[in-house]
Amino acid sequence: MKMTRYFFISDTLDDLERFEEELEQNGILTPQIHVLTGDDLGVARHRHLHSVTPFMKMDVVHSALRGAALGLCLALLALLMAYVAGWSRGPVGWTPFVFLALVILGFCTWQGGLWGVQTPNAHFRDFERAMHEGRHVFFVDAAPQHEAPLKEIAERYVNVSFAGVARGVPSWLVFSQHRLALFFTHTFP
């Protein structure tokens, strides 16, 4: 199922906490709701707010994929060069060139991931200014059946302003996170 990510901005974590509680009461699961802020300690003091994980704040996956794309191009270039130059027709054949291509692909992917560790998440760059101003970004991944209640609840909060939409995470991921949390809280109390 396709989900849409709705972004909201607020100056107060108290309103966001009440907003999240109402969303959860209306069937929106906790893994669908996050707060992106520079005030992680403030979020920790609010029992119902769920902060963005440090991994989500980094651009590791996006940068690693970009590195992999570059690595794939370079690996294909290395294989093409071995073919055109005739090096693969020698006694060793394609083996060293295939390994070279794999090393190039792996290295570029790794370097891309390392670059992503020190880069803010590309999906949150639009909100850097608001965060530097001390504001909080609240986002919800909503399934189509949750969009109407989300909009209705959001209208009741005057200190929470709508900030845009984007493509949400896959619904299977949200469901898996929810089921995993239930497994650990009910199996190991």
Image: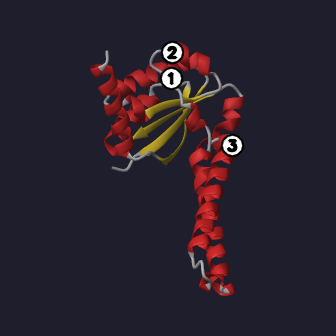
Residue 130: x percent and y percent?
67, 33
Residue 17: x percent and y percent?
48, 20
Residue type of the residue flagged with mark 1? Leu
Going from the N terminus, do you reach mark 2 or mark 3 first? 2
The label number, if any, that marks residue 16 in the structure image: 1
Residue 36: x percent and y percent?
58, 31
User: Is residue 78 positioned above or below 147 on the image?
Assistant: below
Residue type of the residue flagged with mark 3? Thr
Q: How far apart are the alpha carbons under marks 1 and 2?
A: 10 Å
Going from the N terminus, do you reach mark 3 or mark 1 first? 1
Q: Nearer the viewer, mark 3 or mark 1?
A: 3
Q: Which residue bears the numbered disc 2?
A: 46
Q: Residue at x 33, y 21 (%)?
A: 185
User: Is residue 25 positioned above or below 60 on the image?
Assistant: above
The label number, if any, that marks residue 119 in the structure image: 3
Q: Badge 3: few (under 14), some or many (20 or more) residues near its Cα, within 10 Å?
A: some
Corner quadrant of residue 178: top left
Q: How far apart are the alpha carbons under marks 2 and 3?
A: 28 Å
Q: Look at the numbered discs 1 and 2 and tell me whether their residues touch, using CB distance below 8 Å.
A: yes
